[in-house]
Image (spheres, rainbow, N blue to C red):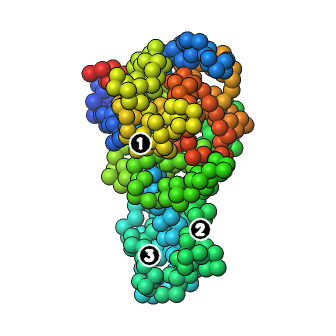
Amino acid sequence: MKKLILLVLVTSFLISCGGKSQGDLVGVRGKKWKPEKPPGMALIPGGAFVMGKQNEDFAKDNSTPPKTVTVRSFYMDETEITNSEYRQYVNWVRDSIIKTRLAQLVEDMGLESEPGIGAYGFQDVDPDQQTAYEKYMYDNYYSLDSLGGKRVLSEEDILWDTEEYPDEYYVEVMDSLYLPQELSITGDRVMDVKKLKYAYTYLDIEAAARAGGDRKNFVKREAVEVYPDTTVWVKDFAYSYNDPMHQDYFWHDAYSDYPVVGVTWKQAKAFCHWRTKFKNDFQKDKKRQSVYAFRLPNEAEWEYAARGGLMGGTYPWGGNYTMNDSGCFLANFKPYRGDYAADKALYTIEAKSYEANGYGLYNMAGNVAEWTNTAYNPAAYEFVSSINPNTVDNQNKRKIVRGGSWKDVAYYLQVSSRAYEYQDSARSYIGFRTVQDYMGSDQDIKK
């Protein structure tokens, strides 16, 4: 017993002498963190503001009584997510599906040594180069995720020219993603975009925190179609000719810098998850700390950002007018009855158009209305918290959209106006932009 006590004392002495704390409480220090603004985003410094209608609500909506609230600092996209940016996501999903199917066929058919498709097999890690952790994960989680653990997709470029297809196996995989030949109109095969799905897993943190219990009960899995519904340009308008927008708006280079539309609330959420994964995969590869998740803004954040630091303004530019001193409209909307083009834009316009507001954000009024992460409740302002207010209700399918659009009258462009759409609806006049929480203190912003 005396030997054991002596050993404990000696060990304690060595630890206290060898450490830097010298017996004092100094905390555990990690790497020095420096906030890094994501490209294309603006930093919105947190603060308090009066949310809601501060003047008479002429529409008698009665769902926006003034309420003083405070929001934390965050980053927000300077523009709505564009067709070009969304196409990057669609192409990533498409390429991942193709490479996974190619690799799976190689493995199922034992074609690893075959020329051609053999180059697209899973790239297994050399066991001699694995760490103990990698070997454990390799042995125990091999079958859980063909894109994780030991399964690494080939870096071989996908061949799109049919004359370059290396063998019939490659043709089989590519053919599985296209519509049948009998559905071809011009003779060119068309990809079946309904097969392009982004599958992901997330934890319903709020439900888990409030209900408690086993974590597994709050792990959610989603598989969401990624391709926007281009038919909205036809379905949204009866007795109207909008076929060119249906055919060209999403894919043609002429519209690359225009906001993506035809995206449901769930599709916008899936995009946010992918954007986070895409960035953090890069961070991990470079051995850097992960970044905070990209997400949809909540309603209070959106309104606070739209005001641009002008707390009493009707519109993002501050005044209650829609024209500048030169008689030019300040946003893309429907100025007059039946006249959509008086503001020089019949439909949408480039995402970076008109003047930015005080926070450097473009088109917070007009162009396209924008999804938020907030469920619509007409009485919400009466009961939501005054700090970072948000109404989360997974049973409520109505989600707040803000900002008004190219087809709306000026009332819906006001920073305090509320509207909603059902989360599974896609429209030709609804898009979205993302936000990311700011990690650090507000004092760092002021320096």
Residues under labels 2 and 3: Cα distance?
Answer: 15 Å
What's the residue at 67%, 49% (across, down)? Answer: 238
Q: Position of residue 226 (x, y in %)?
A: 56, 56
What's the residue at 55%, 69% (across, down)? Answer: 191
Secondary structure of the residue carrying tag 3 is loop
Q: Position of residue 118 (x, y in %)?
A: 45, 82
Give the residue number, with chain letter if any, for mark 1: 351
Residues under labels 2 and 1: Cα distance?
Answer: 28 Å
- Give the class, few, some or many, for how many residues have Cα within 10 Å of label 1's Cα (few <14, many ≥20): many
Residue 268 occupies which quadrant of the picture? top right
Q: Position of residue 291 (x, y in %)?
A: 41, 41
Precedes in sequence: disc 2 or disc 1: 2
Say the numbered circle drawn on residue 160: 3
Precedes in sequence: disc 3 or disc 1: 3
Secondary structure of the residue carrying tag 2 is loop
What's the residue at 40%, 64% (across, down)? Answer: 130
- Give the class, few, some or many, for how many residues have Cα within 10 Å of label 3's Cα (few <14, many ≥20): few
Q: Nearer the viewer, residue 278 or 343?
A: 343
Give the residue type at disc 3: Trp
Give the residue number, with chain letter if any, for mark 2: 192
Give the residue type at disc 2: Asp
Closer to viewer: mark 3 or mark 1: 1
Q: Quadrant of the C terminus?
A: top left
Q: What is the number of callouts on the image?
A: 3
> Is any part of residue 189 visible from this angle?
yes
Closer to viewer: mark 2 or mark 1: 1
Give the residue type at disc 1: Ala
Residues under labels 3 and 1: Cα distance?
Answer: 31 Å
- 37 lies above or below 263: above
Residue 391 occupies which quadrant of the picture? top right
Q: Tell whether label 3 touches label 2 (CB within 8 Å).
A: no
